[in-house]
Image: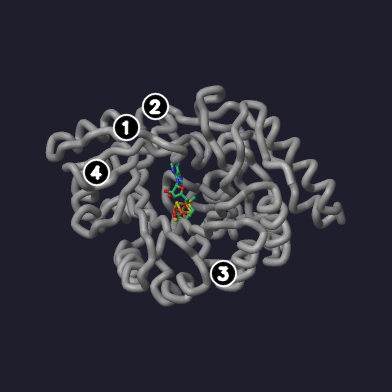
Amino acid sequence: MSPLIDRHGRTKRKLRISLTDRCNFRCTYCMPEHPDWLPKASLLARSEIVRLAGLFVDHGIDQIRLTGGEPLLRQDLLECVHDIGELRERGLRRISMTTNASRIAPKARELVLAGVDDFNVSLDAIDPETFRRLTLREIAPVFDGIDALVDAGAKVKLNAVVVRGDNEKDIVPLLEWAMARKLPLRYIEYMPLDAPGHWKRDAVVSEADMLAAIRERHEVVGQARGHDPATPYLVDGHYPLGIISTVSNPFCSTCDRLRLTATGELFTCLFSPIGTPLGARMRDGIGDDVLAEQVRRAVWLKDAGYASRPGPVDRPLTMHAMGG
Ligand code: SAM
Ligand code: SF4
């Protein structure tokens, strides 16, 4: 079937599926401290997730990232991974997961065996106090989770959001911690996707500021970039660092991603004000042909990206419900 292309000529290859909006953390940059959870009955069942995922795979999506909320809060996570894995026969090449890792330790090996190819672990600081300030939770279970993933032979990458006044002092220590463990790290500029009125431009530590801090201690050389949203750098001649600078220098011109919320709402951009309620329409009994047509249309109309609509988005969903 024809691939999914938007009106800016960008072909879609990657789909992020939020398995749940629930989370055991309360990262201040991601959600309100007391979020309104999506109604439980509206969350997609595993069979519905697999049906929608299959429709995307049939249209050229070859990489699926499972996210949330916290995907480990999904009771049938292993079964989800297994069933999505069956889409490899239809063209899926990669299953990834983004997690806070705090509950992954007992399941790390099973997840690798079930077919998760790589894991992005969110770790914004290595100082326990700083970590607590940002996530309102403890760091020790996250370290246990990372150790368990590494022991299970998983491919692990770290993601860190930097918020001024919270963790910019951790930029170099976290980098050195990750370098010592040979775990690739990506810094992410704080984006306006959290609780309404919370994000402030002044709280964004820009890519330039992050580089300046790192260059006080290390040599950092820019590398040629591909489709990844992160600008790649090499630190001290050997260590791969990425920086996602959506706010100071958005890189949307080759965006190949789509996002499905836990209720099956399709968002073609992180910053889209509205989505296409595929899950609800599926429950209304709409067949795959009509659903596919609605997907093609939504993708075609995808906006250029953050630069065309900078600043906070006026919509009820914050990052934890959007899927990151
Ligand atoms: N709970 C999982 C985790 O934290 O990795 C998966 C969901 S989380 C919403 C996915 C990613 O979004 C995380 O790496 C998180 O740091 C990032 N994120 C959340 N809010 C953000 C914001 N306002 N700006 C930039 N990144 C954000
Ligand atoms: Fe939860 Fe991840 Fe959001 Fe933190 S970033 S509150 S761990 S969904």
Above/below status of 160 relative to 298:
below
> Which residue is under mark 3?
77
Residue 317 x %, y %: 60, 44
Cβ–Cβ under 8 Å for marks 4 and 3 = no
Identify the element where label 2 is drawn.
loop
Mark 3–mark 2 distance (CA, rounded to whole Å): 36 Å
Which kind of residue does numbered mark 1 sit on? Glu
Q: Which mark is residue 248?
A: 2
> Pointer 4: what residue?
171
Who comes first in sequence, dot 4 or dot 3? 3
Task: In the rendered view, tell whether residue 2 sits above or below residue 151.
Answer: above
Q: Which amino acid, by three-letter code, is at mark 2?
A: Ser
- Whether residue 95 sits left or right of residue 291 in the image: it is left
Q: Amino acid at mark 4?
A: Ile
Q: Quadrant of residue 99?
A: bottom left
Residue 157, horizontal then vertical, whole percent? 36, 55
- The residue pinned by badge 1 equals 207
The span from disc 1 to disc 2 (Cα, nearest Å) is: 7 Å
The reply to whether callout 3 and callout 2 are in contact (CB within 8 Å) is no
Q: Determine crowd level at label 3: few under 14, some 14-19, many 20+ residues with C-alpha closer than 10 A.
A: some
